[in-house]
Image (spheres, coloured by chain):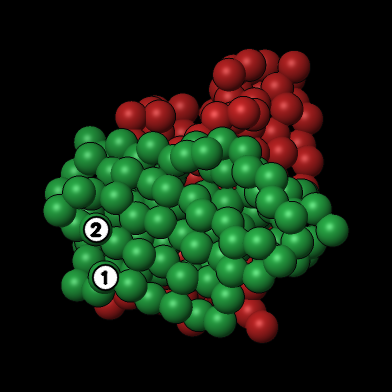
Chain colours: A green, B red
């Protein structure tokens, strides 16, 4: 089955700097890659996603890139703010009737003011 | 903005007891999911549900687990005889259509503690 690895497990940046979180996946059939943000005491919140027919997607300060050949995808957050501090999860799935998400281990991002 | 809700937020139960975790998915969604996260580990898929039947389930989802949509709004996860290792955060998620976009929206979770 699919295996998703995520790095780093913790990331500390200064406010205003950029943050990059990387994930690799094993199943070449995976075609959908969402990113979730989880704040303390809350459920994972979908922040951006990308499909395998697209190499890059951007939404304001957040961007995701996908390299299908290398089977890795990354989350980029620019101009980080303290409210970006949270745990970020990447995931992969094959969009079908089941649509099971396989998650990475999570990255705890800390943005220091 | 519509959101997935879950009750209770925290459930404490004794080993061997049955528990039912409840979820109200987003109203126009058709696909429903349960995931769990044991403390310090990855979020793991348990089961997906569509058109009143299970679409896919993981190895974790054994005979002790069952899901049900008892009415038009609730989606439940039942664990018949809880074990210590069932202690985890349980997340419900829903999506409008699995085939078209796959976007899954998660609830806040139920923390299950088995003693």
Residue at label 1? A55
Same chain for the residues at labels 1 and 2, yes or no?
A: yes
Residue at label 2? A67
x 78%, y 41%: residue: B10
x 40%, y 56%: residue: A74
Image side of residue A1 versus residue A77, left or right: left
Residue B29 to residue A66: above or below: below
Q: Position of residue B65 (x, y in %)?
A: 46, 34
Q: Is residue A110 visible?
A: yes
Dot 1: chain letter: A
Dot 2: chain letter: A
Q: Quadrant of residue A57?
A: bottom left
Nearer to the camera, B40 or A77: A77
Disc 1/disc 2 C-alpha distance (Å) = 7 Å
CB within 8 Å, label 1 to label 2: yes
Q: Position of residue A60 (x, y in %)?
A: 56, 82
- Which SS class for mark 1? loop
Q: Is residue B109 visible?
A: no
Q: Position of residue B34 (x, y in %)?
A: 49, 48
């Amino acid at each position: 089955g699919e295996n998703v690895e995520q790095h780093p497990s913790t990331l500390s940046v200064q406010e205003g700097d950029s943050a990059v979180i990387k994930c690799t996946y094993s199943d070449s059939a995976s075609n959908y890659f969402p990113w979730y943000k989880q704040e303390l005491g809350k459920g994972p919140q979908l922040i951006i996603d990308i499909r395998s027919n697209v190499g890059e997607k951007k939404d304001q300060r957040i961007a995701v890139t996908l390299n299908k050949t290398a089977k890795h995808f990354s989350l980029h957050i620019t101009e980080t703010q303290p409210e970006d501090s949270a745990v970020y999860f990447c995931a992969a799935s094959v969009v079908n009737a089941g649509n099971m998400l396989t998650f990475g281990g999570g990255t705890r991002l800390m943005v220091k003011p | 903005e519509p959101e997935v809700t879950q009750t209770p937020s925290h459930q404490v139960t004794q080993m061997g007891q049955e528990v039912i975790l409840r979820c109200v998915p987003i109203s126009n969604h058709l696909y429903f999911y349960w995931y769990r996260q044991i403390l310090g580990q990855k979020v793991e898929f348990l089961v997906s549900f569509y058109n009143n039947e299970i679409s896919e389930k993981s190895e974790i989802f054994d005979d002790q687990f069952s899901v049900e949509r008892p009415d038009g709004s609730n989606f439940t996860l039942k664990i018949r005889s809880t074990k210590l290792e069932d202690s985890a955060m349980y997340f419900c998620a829903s999506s409008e259509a699995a085939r078209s976009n796959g976007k899954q929206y998660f609830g806040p979770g139920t923390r299950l503690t088995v003693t």
